[in-house]
Image (tube, rainbow, N blue to C red):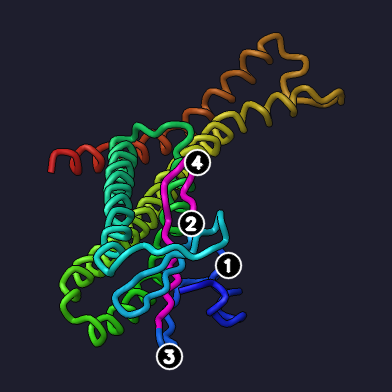
Amino acid sequence: MQLKELNSFLLEDIQNPSHPSEFNTYEDYGVMILRLPEQKEEIEVESFAFIIEGNNVFLYDREKQDIKQLGELDKLNHFLDVKVDHLIKQMQQFHYKIDMLEESLYEENLSDDFMQEWLYYKKNISLIHRVMFHSVLAFEQFFGYIKKQSPEDIMAFDDLLEHMQRVKNLAHSAMEKLDNLYDFYRAKVDEKMNKNVYYLTMISGIFLPLTLITGFFGMNTGGLPFMDDPEGTNKAIFIALILEVFLILPIIMMNNKKIKRFSLKKKH
């Protein structure tokens, strides 16, 4: 198989590293383009173009821009199996890290970079799922082709297809975990915000009478109560304290009810 034997449209697809995964058959050969995620410093997507002619497999070398012989079908199976096994291990690591993130959220031991970690996992796992979704579809078409052309090799490729589907399913499961984790995180953040607003409202309510009385008696006008009374200041303070008592008592009673309900829940 020589590069010049391929038609120009097919050659353009093979040379394009962003071309989506697909499998097509021609008169004497089949062509499978597979894009697979790979863990480096970040998750990157590698594109592989395989040409299957009978029992022989050729791989397009992007560096040399030429076709090289990979071997027979068992070599293709081994080549892909190594990469898919690495992906399974990577997904297992992602699941473990997400579980640790979930545990820290339940124990209210959140780090300051919780959202950065969540976004990192969400971005990379979504990429893996998106790429593997199309790769599995292309490989299923290739599997049907091999089933007719070379049925003796079908068992090995059946296992490989199952492993690729497992990577896709693991990625989907991890995405669902992350979505549930985000919903719980937002609920915790909203609860904390509501508590802060509640406490600020209580503090404002407590100091409101003092503010009103201070402002009232601080006006530079005549005819104010207790203006000529030697005990005027003490009386004003006494009135303020009475108002504070009437305001604080209902708040204390409301909070006591909440504390009792919370204590009962913890006992149960």
Q: How many marks?
A: 4
Q: Are marks 1 and 2 in contact (CB under 8 Å)?
A: no
Q: Image check: 98 left or right of 116?
A: left
Q: Quick check: 201 above or below 227?
A: below
> Looking at the image, is mark 1 or mark 3 nearer the viewer?
3
| Mark number displayed over residue 15 | 1
Q: Residues within 10 Å of mark 1 (few under 14, many from 20)?
A: some
The 10 Å Cα crowd at callout 2, few under 14, some 14 to 19, many 20 or more, is some
Q: Gap between marks 1 and 3, in whole Å?
A: 21 Å
Residue 3 relative to residue 28: left or right? right
Magenta-drawn stretch, dominant element (helix, strand or loop) = strand
Q: Which residue is mark 3?
A: 27
The percent coordinates of residue 7 (x first, y second) are 57, 82
Relative depth, front residue between 98 and 68: 68
- Which residue is label 4 attached to? 116
**Callout 1: helix, strand or loop?**
helix
For residue 45, which numbered disc appears in the image?
A: 2
Query: Does residue 250 sit above or below 89 in this rendering?
Result: above
28 or 114, which is in the foreground? 28
Looking at the rendered image, the disc whose residue lies closer to the viewer, 3 or 2, is 3
Q: What is the distance, in whole Å, between disc 2 and disc 4 at their CAs? A: 22 Å
The answer to whether 197 appears left or right of 227 in the picture is left
Please report whichever mark, 1 or 2, sits nearer to the chain's N-terminal start: 1
Q: What residue is at 24 percent from the left and 87 percent from the top?
A: 148
Is residue 42 magenta-colored? yes
Give the residue type at disc 1: Gln
Disc 4 residue crowd, few under 14, some 14–19, many 20+, Cα 10 Å:
few
Disc 1 to disc 2, C-alpha distance: 15 Å
Q: Which residues are magenta?
A: 29-44
Marks 4 and 3, Cα distance to the nearest angstrom? 51 Å
From the viewer's side, name the closer residue of 39 and 13. Answer: 13
